[in-house]
Image (cartoon, rainbow, N blue to C red):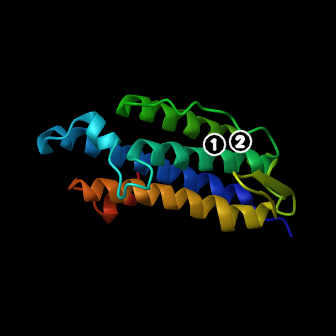
Amino acid sequence: MTIELHAIAAPVFTARLKSLVHLLKIAEAEGPARGLSEEAVLGARLASDMFDLKRQVQIATDHAKGAMARLAGIDVPSFPDSEQTFSELYARIDKTLAFVASVPASAVDGRQEAIVTLKLRHETMELKAFDYLQGFAIPNFYFHLTTAYDILRHLGMPVGKRDFLWQE
């Protein structure tokens, strides 16, 4: 049976990355009113041993573009993690959205049994594409997206569930 991996992955990454832009725009607008500089907002973290907001955004985009590339069996595009401003993060998200949109369903669908090899810091994992998508890529994407949202809530930004689930 062919599984339409593209229909599982691309719409989720696209919708949630757009909601991330929505969340960041709220933070960009509200930060100064709360006495927070752009640097303070983007450098905020929930705990000292966690990544800051800008890194959460970078990693969320990495999971989206990485998943689409790995599912299609193509090279993962490399983006330098150099963003320091809201506008630079928006540009990174836009590049990620463009890449996700560029991967055709025909390159992904039916590849559920293909082996995806992940080289992590201390190990290499090999997973079937379907298992990788459901058990690794999407959960990690949501983890970093949710952590970004939680950082904004922690800063007192006026964001809620509707903003997290925001749709154009």
Q: Is residue 150 above or below residue 25?
A: below
Q: Which mark is residue 117?
A: none
- x, y percent for residue 45: 35, 52
Dot 1: what SS? Answer: helix
Residue at image location 80% in from the left, 40% down from the top: 74
Secondary structure under tag 2 reads loop
Closer-to-camera residue (37/92): 37
Give percent across and percent down for residue 160: 28, 62
Query: Quarter of the image containing the N terminus?
Result: bottom right
- Rendered position, 98 above or below 143: above
Q: Residue at x 60, y 48 (%)?
A: 64
Q: Quadrant of residue 37?
A: top left
Q: Is residue 117 left or right of residue 63?
A: right
- Disc 2 and disc 1: Cα gap in Å? 6 Å
Neighbours of disc 1 within 10 Å: few (<14), some (14-19), many (20+) = many
Query: Residues at badges 2 and 1 in contact (C-beta under 8 Å)?
Result: yes
| 28 to 128, vertically: above or below | above
Question: Residue at (56%, 40%) from the top-left corner?
Answer: 97
Q: Residue at x 87, y 63 (%)?
A: 113
Inspect the image, locate mark 1, and give the three-letter code of the amino acid beneath it.
Answer: Val
Coordinates of residue 109 in the picture (x, y in percent):
79, 55
The crowd level at tag 2 (other Cα within 10 Å; few <14, some 14-19, many 20+) is some
The residue tagged 1 is: 100
Left or right? Give the position of 65 relative to 1: left
Q: Amino acid at mark 2?
A: Val
Q: Which mark is residue 103?
A: 2
